[in-house]
Amino acid sequence: MARRTAQRAAIRKVLEEAGRPLSPAEILQASQLFVPGLGLTTVYRTVNALVDEGWLVAVELPGEAARYELAGKAHHHHFHCRCCGAVFNVSGCTDGLEDLLPKGFEMEDHAIVLYGACEACCSKLSGSPTPVESSANA
Amino acid sequence: MARRTAQRAAIRKVLEEAGRPLSPAEILQASQLFVPGLGLTTVYRTVNALVDEGWLVAVELPGEAARYELAGKAHHHHFHCRCCGAVFNVSGCTDGLEDLLPKGFEMEDHAIVLYGACEACCSKLSGSPTPVESSANA
DNA sequence: ATAGGTGCAAACAGTTTGCATGTAT
DNA sequence: ATACATGCAAACTGTTTGCACCTAT
């Protein structure tokens, strides 16, 4: 990441302003508003570089492609809305995880994913969902 | 799943005796001991059918390909050994997950994944790991 | 000027599908 | 006999790599 280019600036900006983890495809779509010719390859390469650099962290949810968010956030977990597909950060954690551990095992880390309906989807469960994320049209 | 064939019997047997979630590749490898000509396609088709049928459940861990285990187990979560790559079931759960939920969100479900070293790896951390799972050699 | 970055196309891995052959019923 | 299952190869999706061209320094 030695050089500052328009595509990198765009990708960083998009990630900074997203407020939630974004997939490479989402990053591409949003960044192309700034740099129309941007290619998916560059998104992957830049994102991987930013992860190596410690500026981004990968958010990997079960059965989903990796999403990326700014590093340095406080310990948190994720909520995956089954209705609109968006992923939200939830702050805080639980105790008692140690209790789950089988004898002789050592825990270094953990991940918690909550599934359900986000606020927006909850309030209009009868209406059509707002696909904030996948295949969003414009 | 109308017909009982040697390949399906083998796949079911392997899953029944595994005691932990298996990936399609692992299922293939183990099943080929019974049915040498078995193809990966059949594993996928059978596994998907067994999931639809409710006999299997998919275990999807962050950033990992789906694994499969017998359905009907009590509520449990998973431990992923970073040393040998194997996935273990851990029984029990935590309270307090509700507290993490942002206002207005509704939780239907949750997943917890613990990461660390399993008992076998803990006891020989200085030795070479035993790859029970990936690229296991025979 | 030159190392580093970009974009296209091809390579890859995991999974699914089409189709002709094989087999349980 | 026949519908269902299998296995190969091809299609597909998401991600990475090779390579020629371009550009920030």
Image: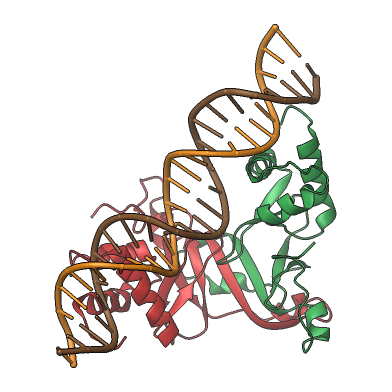
Chain colours: A green, B red, C orange, D brown
Based on the displayed image, in which of its 4 quarters is residue A136 positioned?
Answer: bottom right
Query: Residue B46: x, y in percent?
Result: 34, 76
Q: Quadrant of the N terminus of chain B?
A: bottom left
Q: Which residue is located at x 17 percent, y 64 percent?
A: B36
Depth check, front residue: B36 or B128? B36
Q: Is residue C3 left or right of residue B101?
A: left
Query: Residue B97: x, y in percent?
Result: 70, 78
Is residue A126 shown above or below B14? below
Q: Which residue is located at x 82 percent, y 85 percent?
A: A124
Q: Which residue is located at x 74 percent, y 41 percent?
A: A37
Q: Quadrant of the C terminus of chain B?
A: bottom left
Camera sees residue B96: no
Depth check, front residue: A52 or D11? D11
Camera sees residue A66: yes
Depth check, front residue: B52 or B23? B52
Q: Is residue B101 left or right of residue B111?
A: right
Query: Residue A93: x, y in percent?
Result: 72, 69
Say how many tags the image has. Answer: 0
Query: Residue B59: x, y in percent?
Result: 48, 72
Q: Which residue is located at x 77 percent, y 89 percent?
A: A126
Based on the displayed image, in which of its 4 quarters is residue B21 positioned?
Answer: bottom left
Based on the displayed image, in which of its 4 quarters is residue B47 positioned?
Answer: bottom left
